[in-house]
Amino acid sequence: MGGKMQTKKLEKPKKESRTKILIDYSICGEDGKIDPRDCCKCLRVCDPAVFIMHSSLDLDFKDPYDPQRWRITPQWGSLCTRCLKCVEICPENAISIKW
Ligand code: SF4
Ligand code: SF4
């Protein structure tokens, strides 16, 4: 009885640096020479399924209804384990990852 109340300082959660996954669309998709539908290697190699492939109908192009325009988007970047398999497998070096 009569003991001092102990207060414990909560530790600040460590700030994880965010993973930035960039696709060079001048190489793959859109104006690039690679149609991602013919490749798909990054999609297949990524275990947590970070990437999605989609038509670019909603993007601002000269002809937004051109069915030939598709792109890869790193939609779920927070799931990335930084294994770099996508960077290694991309035949065009179109993917870069930073954190
Ligand atoms: S580094 Fe690994 S987990 Fe991250 S997007 Fe590339 S393949 Fe997926
Ligand atoms: S692996 Fe590279 S070239 Fe192939 S779809 Fe992915 S980003 Fe494009």
Image (cartoon, rainbow, N blue to C red):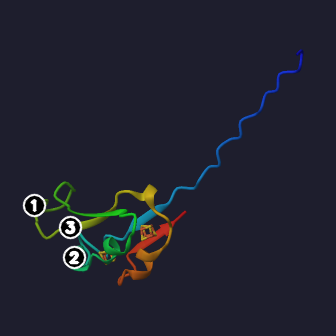
**CA–CA distance between discs 1 and 2?**
16 Å
- At label 3, the amino acid type is Trp
Badge 3 element: strand
Which amino acid is tagged 2? Asp
Mark 3 or 1 closer to N-term?
Answer: 1
- Circle 3 packing at 10 Å, graded few (<14), some (14-19), many (20+), is many
Residue at 11% across, 65% down? 66
Position of 79 with respect to 59 (left or right) is: right
Whether ligand 2 has any atom under 8 Å from the Cβ at mark 2 is answered as no
Q: Determine which residue is flagged by label 2.
A: 35
Q: Where is residue 62 in the image (x, y as percent from the top left)?
A: 15, 62
The correct choice, above or below, for 36 with respect to 22 in the image is below
Image point (55%, 62%), residue name: 99
Labels 2 and 3 touching (C-beta < 8 A): yes
What residue is disc 1 on?
65
Q: Can residue 71 be seen in this view?
A: yes
